[in-house]
Image (spheres, rainbow, N blue to C red):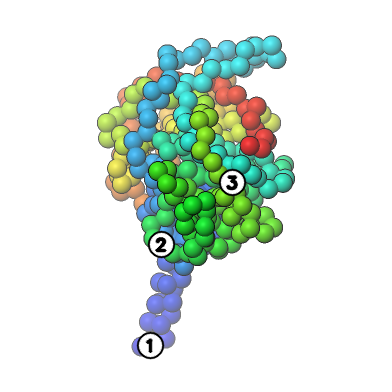
Amino acid sequence: MTDELIQAAYEKIASAAPPPERIRARLQARSRSHRQRRAVLAGAGALGATALTVPFVHFLRGGSPPETAPIDAVTASAPPPKPAATAPLRYALGWLPAGVGEQYREATTDGGTRTWLLDGLTYPTDYTVAKGVTLAVGERSEDNAGTPVTIGDVTGRLVVTDSSFVEWTPKGGPTMIVTVYGLPGSTEVALRMARSVRPTRATIPVWIRSPWIPDRFRGSTSARLIPLAGGGWRQELTYAAPRFTQVLRIVAGTAKPSDPTQLQRQRPDGTWLWIPEHPADMVGLEPFEPPTTAEATRLLDELVCVTPDLEWVGGRL
């Protein structure tokens, strides 16, 4: 074999090995289609998400669109906002390491994801990863690699890269993954967190919903809430057809969009609504068929988006 062929072979192998940052981002930045199709957990196989591969309970608990007061009309004595819907958490942590506060929430059919970051950090909106911990209910990996560990009365798996992952499936429950990145003793922290998880009847408020979407995007749904510095916020509503053949994302937030959009507008209360030209964390979707102009207009016209209650930001359990 010539030196050129040997070098080409090495480059092919290197290009197939994902960096650790991508591994972390798959769980914490919720890069779902990218994670399912291409990202591979080093030495342990690819992680896929079930949270977007089952039909979302289509906001059955949501009532009629609530009225939202303009931002400058909200006072300390005003009643708390009413969510557009609620979703069951199903499982919750009983223990967290010191020095972290909640900075991210996502509702899905199986309970969704919550992330606690080191005090003083905010959740990144550019799909990078900040130091902290995550509980993802409804996540699962695609193989059985890792070290067996006991979580309650079942056997789970521990995988350690530059992050520590613990995955397990409680009897009668969905598969779950705890992730710890950038904390001292991350493996011990991940195991203790996983062993503290218990069922809960608590619900999580969902502040955004779409009464209508084009049929080609139907299949699964997630609703993310990301607090921003200075009291702002960003909400993302994502629909994915089976096998992510088509993906639709609708975004609302207090800041004007900085990435290319297909359609954007600002409501009288100051909230920006937009449909990204292409979801930034969705790669390899072929062919991508964005909403038509008429569809995009209807989606933003009918979108129900409530200014979220952010009292939970920075909290613990």
Where on the picture, by quarter, is residue 95?
Answer: top right
Query: Dividing the picture into quarters, in which one does residue 288 lie?
Result: top left
For disc 1, the marked residue is 2
The residue tagged 2 is 144
Name the residue at 29% across, 29% down. 214
Q: Is residue 92 above or below residue 293?
A: below
Which label's residue is closer to the chain start, 2 or 1?
1
**Label 2 – label 1 distance at C-alpha:** 38 Å
* Mark 2 vs 1: CB contact within 8 A: no
Amino acid type at image mark 3:
Ser
Relative image position of residue 63 (x, y in whole percent): 42, 16
Q: Amino acid at mark 2?
A: Asn
Residue at 33%, 27% in the rendered image: 213
At x 57%, y 17%, the residue is: 81
Mark 2 element type? loop
Residue 128 in view: no
The crowding category of the residue bearing disc 3, from other C-alpha atoms within 10 Å (few below 14, some 14 to 19, many at least 20), is some
Between disc 3 and disc 2, whose residue precedes?
2
Residue with the mark numbered 3: 196
Q: Residue furthest bottom?
A: 1
Point out residue 21 in the picture as x, y percentages from the top left corner: 55, 57
> Closer to the camera, 137 or 280?
137
316 with respect to 215 (left or right): right
Q: Amino acid at mark 1?
A: Thr
Instruction: Report the quarter where the C terminus lies.
Output: top right
